[in-house]
Image (spheres, grey):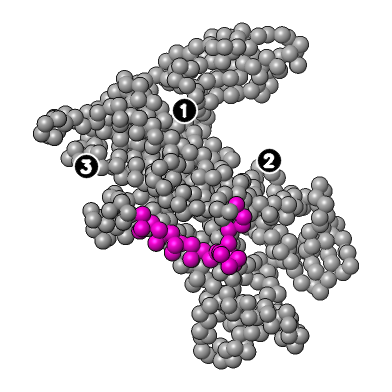
Amino acid sequence: EIYYLTDCFLRILEGLRDENAKLKYRLNFLQKSLQEERSKTAKSMININSCLQEIFGAAIQAAYPDLENPPLVVTPSQQPKFGDYQCNSAMGITQILLKTKEQKVSPREIAEKISKNIPANECIEKIEIAGPGFINVHLRKDFVSKQLSSLLMNGVQPPAVGKRKKVVVDFSSPNIAKEMHVGHLRSTIIGESMCRLFEFAGYDVLRLNHLGDWGTQFGMLIAHLQDKFPDYLTVSPPIGDLQAFYKESKRRFDTEEEFKKRAYQCVVLLQSKNPEFIKAWELICDVSRKEFQKIYNCLDITLIERGESFYHEMMKDIVKEFEDKGFVQVDDGRKIVFVPGFPVPLTIMKSDGGYTYDTSDLAALKHRLCEEKADILIYVVDSGQSVHLQTVFAAGQMIGWYDPKVTRVAHAAFGVVLGEDKKKFKTRSGDTVRLIDLLEEGLKRAMDKLRDKERDKVLTAEELKAAQTSVAFGCIKYADLSHNRLNDYVFSFDKMLDDRGNTAAYLLYAFTRIRAIARLASIDEQMLRKAAREEVLILDHEKEWKLGKCILRFPEILQKILDDLLLHTLCDYLYELATTFTEFYDNCYCVEKDRQSGQIVKVNMWRLLLCEATATIMAKGFDILGIKPVQRM
């Protein structure tokens, strides 16, 4: 429809072309934009499931034009004998006809009627009706072959997702003056991967680090800084261990009454923007930032910092807006807001006139919606904050900042990290595990694993170092992302470094082996590109066919994650792709050699192209997960 309307507009402009030079410029601009959009759409990977849904949607509409919103259920088949995909809508339509029209029609009869109305298309070879009314779909081999060739020529292109939307992702969010610990690991890893997915899909993504960099705790930190480093304004204080510094100030705050009073005075002076106290606050924040950045560098995390302090000046207006709309009640000096459906109110101003987390979260929500103009807003925050965030979101709807039917505001909740004893992950002494210690332990164990496999004897020092970081950080990320984020998961270095099963170690080894096949056959990238243009991908062997279909399911996997934000689906898919490839490789010779001499006698180029397509999809999957594979391992 967009192309049709644009073409009509272009014809109108064409008629006026000679009358106005500006129109000529605009015409050229629109023609170029349309060509680019068409080119982009042509290169996009086809979501086969979506195509089949369109086909069956049209068939159901033709068969039952009076039905409103009939069920549309299309899924990949679990067994080859049932075809490649299944449409299971007939059973649902049976129930609707019985309830709304009191018509008793068998699902099989409905399936037959749908099948007769299938429109002409390029992807379905044949359909069969099985059982009570399942419609089994067999894909055309030339269609699958064509899509694989397109993938090889154009690279992994994102599926067409429509309008370019603005996405804001709130993740990581450590607290200043406190070290990042294992509790921050999940938010950081999950949030980064979500950003990468939305960026690949073509959205405009803003990655926000909502630092805890404001509040009463800074009073005690500044007071302690003044006592311990009185010349902090002229000489940068050598705070080596900020965690110890925080604990010292907290102990004094809890035990020394005079110190406590002075800490509260420091808060007042900080919030009144006294230059000396702002300087002290900035010094403390800078020390924390440097420590956080070490973690982000290791894990290849990119963030824009917008801590609570960023929203401080907006909080007064937030309170006034809720007051003006009549939503504020006063309770024992506090200003609170009750949101329908939520038993605990939001406290937007304390009895002493100070603001709270509720106020700053409301200010952040409004800024992201009204100033950043976000279409999608995702908070990657632990499940313990679920009620709080849902209350804040509901308050935003109540006051009219957004309509949930137009703007998506989601809490991507996650469970806690457990130790192998199934209890909250802690050190032997009972302390919270520091994230930097965890990463260093991962590096050590990855190197031990590589040396156990005698990789140090075949890799250069540089290659060994690259393999170490790839395995260490890749395994830590994958162990998290491969679990359903809604559940708790057990952290185990032994399991995540195992090169058998659904682990990053297994997938990384599989990837390097696939990449090595063409190299060992002396086939370079240029030869593969030429073959991709000229060769027809033969999919006669059942394992070739199975692998080809598995490769092309990538777009529908990504679409599912864009909808439900559950990244373990991608991990499961990559594991399925790797194991499907192994089946293919064990049954289909890519490079045939003489048994006596070991000389290459034949290269089956279409099979090498299947290897290349598999590796290309795996590489993009790794990139979305934030995992860096290496060529040699």
- Label 3: how many Cα within 10 Å (few below 14, some 14–19, many 20+): few
Q: In the rendered structure, which disc, 3 or 1, sits on the residue that comes first in sequence?
A: 1
Q: Mark 3 points at which residue?
A: 519
132 lies left or right of 627: right
Label 2 sits on what residue type?
Lys
357 lies left or right of 622: right
Mark identifier at residue 560:
none
Could you tell me which secondary element the residue under label 2 belongs to? loop
Q: Where is residue 480 in the image (x, y as percent from the top left)?
A: 52, 50
Residues rendered magenta in the picture: 422-449
Q: Name the residue under label 2.
A: 405
Q: How far apart are marks 2 and 3 (CA)?
A: 52 Å
Residue at the spot 30% in from the left edge and 31% down from the top edge: 585
Q: Distance between the residues labelled 3 and 1?
A: 32 Å
Q: Does the magenta stretch include residue 441?
A: yes
Mark identifier at residue 48:
1
Q: In the rendered structure, which disc, 2 or 1, sits on the residue that comes first in sequence?
A: 1
Residue 460 visible: yes
Residue at the spot 65% in from the left edge and 80% down from the top edge: 249
Task: Choose mark 2 or mark 1, whichever is in front.
Answer: 1
Query: From what the image shows, is residue 558 above or below residue 442?
Result: above
Label 1 sits on what residue type?
Ile
Residue at the spot 35% in from the left edge and 36% down from the top edge: 614
